[in-house]
Amino acid sequence: MTSPVLSSQATAPLSGRSALSLDPSNDDDTADAGRRDSDIRGIFAPPQTSTLPADAAAMRLVTALLARGVDTYFGIPGGPVCPIFEALRMTPGVTLIESRHESNAAFAAAAYQRASGKTPCVVVTAGPGITNTVTGIASASLERIPMLVICGDVPWATHGGCLAQDSGPAGLGVEQILAPITRARVRVAHPRSAATQALAALDAATSPIHPGPALLVVPLDRATPSAPEVPVAPAAKRYVLAPDAEATAVAMRWVAAGRRPLIVLGGGCRGHEPAVQRLVDLLDVPFVTTPRAKGVVSELHPRSLRTGGMAASMWARRYTAEPVDVALVLGTDLDDTSMGPTPYIGVGGRLVHVDIDPAVFNRNAPTALAIQSDVGAFAEAAYEVVSQEGLLNGTCHATLRAIKREPAFDVPDFAGDDAPRIRPHRALADLQAATGPDTRFITDIGEHMLFALHYLVATSSDQFQIHLNLGSMGSGIAGSIGLALADRRRGVVCVCGDGGMQMAGMEALVAVRERLPVVFAVFNDARYNMVHHGMKQIFGQADAWESPFIDFASWSRAIGMPAAIIEGPGQITPSLLRELRPFGGPVLLDIRIDRESRIRGGGRVEALQHMSMLATGASGQ
């Protein structure tokens, strides 16, 4: 085993305008670390006075949202939105995370919400500020993540002239741009209604039936004038969509009578883990999780077949290779990434699909029984039916034992792979072993994502995150910021590629500034590897998708983040990580992987070939 290459000029993460040396031999730095932190925080403490009046509409708005639990904001300041930023600066109890790009602010906010359960706010300026957020908002919309987006605007209505960055109906028309990907679009009509209109947008974002981003546009001239305080009591009840009792009973009788039944747990099970696990424990039926649900129930559960769909485990592939006759599908749209090489229902089988959104039924798989319901409410109702009627299956024990005699992984002994050039599966095994069971993983989008889905072992839903519905490169890198902010005591590993790091890597500056416990594990292969292999598989040639080699360790050192170059197996160790960050904060591992390693038949190319003309040739014949 060779040693990793450490950065020679590593420094502690920057805080404010100062930096701490990472050299343990520097006694002065070590002794003064606490005092310096205190001094630095004092520099940025909110002043006692401001030219923004305490009763300004912007202050009322931020205070009203804080009373409803919205205390964490992600964004970048700008002229038309400056009153909101000043209100955030002046309001005790509010945290503002200044991102490096607006779309990444939305990705960070989404990961924060999923990890903390609290609704975040993304706050951006007019013009490019709001247009830059579109990708992040679209991802949150598809993931059904509640989020308030506040956009400033120039005072075009009052001014009457032609103003740069006009985001109203005669300018960009941001309400129209964001209409398909937001739950509501509210433009503040008057300073006195700014706070109440913000609460209306928040209610739309947090709807239990259809949560997602909601837009609040605050023109500059509506944010600065005085506004009265209008306390608004929240609604006393939040309604839950309960399942039909008879349909629930029928569904559970089908599952109990199945010869080869299967439970499929989707991303909609997040937030309902206790009820879902209790039902899974009782039913005595094998289950898989889709990529977005990895860890919702522990992958070490005796009836877990691990991940289904894209990058599916070998257990899931073996079980579904013979036709499943009854499938109970909870909280997933069954898109191509959720199904992949694991057909969840065989010809003539009966699929029971449970989801809060009826639009997902009977689209990618024929549905025998569709139940519109909150997933948690269905799991509780189903548990009662099974308990009362004794509907236990118990027919799959022998089949499950036979399947599990074989490895779950494409490379059975992946943790012991000692190839000289470290392979992605060995890098993941080393990362998980070095960081401990409490560490949370988030993956970006790319070939590394397939390896993370397949090889990482998640025992709880907070151990793994992926934003896959839109599949945007950079989402995991920015998301690691939000994930770490949700609980600073627990470490985060961001599995990403060199392509994504080139797109969104400057968000690491936020981790440096905030001293977040993030390990950026960059799978450095000098190309868009998923695109490379996909194009080669389809068209036979892929050289155009190479990219320049980047020395990410040097780059990381330049922004004040310790780094190490990893080239061989066994180099990622607990002692290495301790050596890199004696004072905490983020680090980067520049992992020079064997870029020819792949997971057999687990990518998206196979699914796209199956669904398109490419399966039969470009002519469609």
Image (cartoon, grey):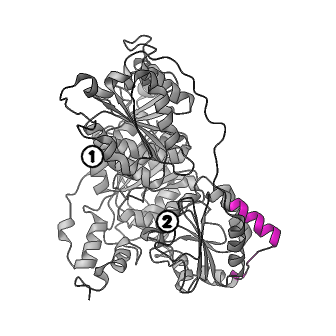
Q: Residue at x 28, y 56 (%)?
A: 499
The amino acid at mark 1 is Ser
Instruction: Reply yes or no: does residue 21 show up in magenta.
Output: no
What stretch of residues is rendered in magenta? 379-397
Quick check: can you spot residue 181?
Answer: yes
Q: What main secondary structure does the magenta stretch of the protein show?
A: helix
Foreground label between 2 and 1: 2
Between the C-alphas of marks 2 and 1, the distance is 47 Å
* In the foreground, 394 or 64: 64
Callout 2 touching callout 1 (CB < 8 Å): no
Above or below: residue 65 compared with residue 482:
above
Whole-percent x, y for residue 465 in the image: 49, 55
Quadrant location, the N terminus = bottom left
Question: Disc 1 on helix, strand or loop?
Answer: helix
Residue 385 is one of the magenta-drawn residues: yes
Quick one: which residue is furthest to the bottom in this view?
Answer: 621
Quarter occupied by residue 59 = top left
> Is 343 rendered above or below residue 36?
below
Q: Is 344 situated left or right of 605 in this image?
A: right
Instruction: Tell me if residue 6 can be seen.
Output: no
Residue receiving disc 1: 554
Numbered label tally: 2
Residue 184 position in % (x across, y down) = 43, 43
Q: Nearer the viewer, residue 482 or 62?
A: 62
Question: Which residue appears at 63% of the width and 44% of the height?
Answer: 238
Label disc, if present, on residue 360 of the rendered structure: 2
Q: Secondary structure at mark 2?
A: helix
Earlier-in-chain disc, 2 versus 1: 2
Q: Amino acid at mark 2?
A: Val
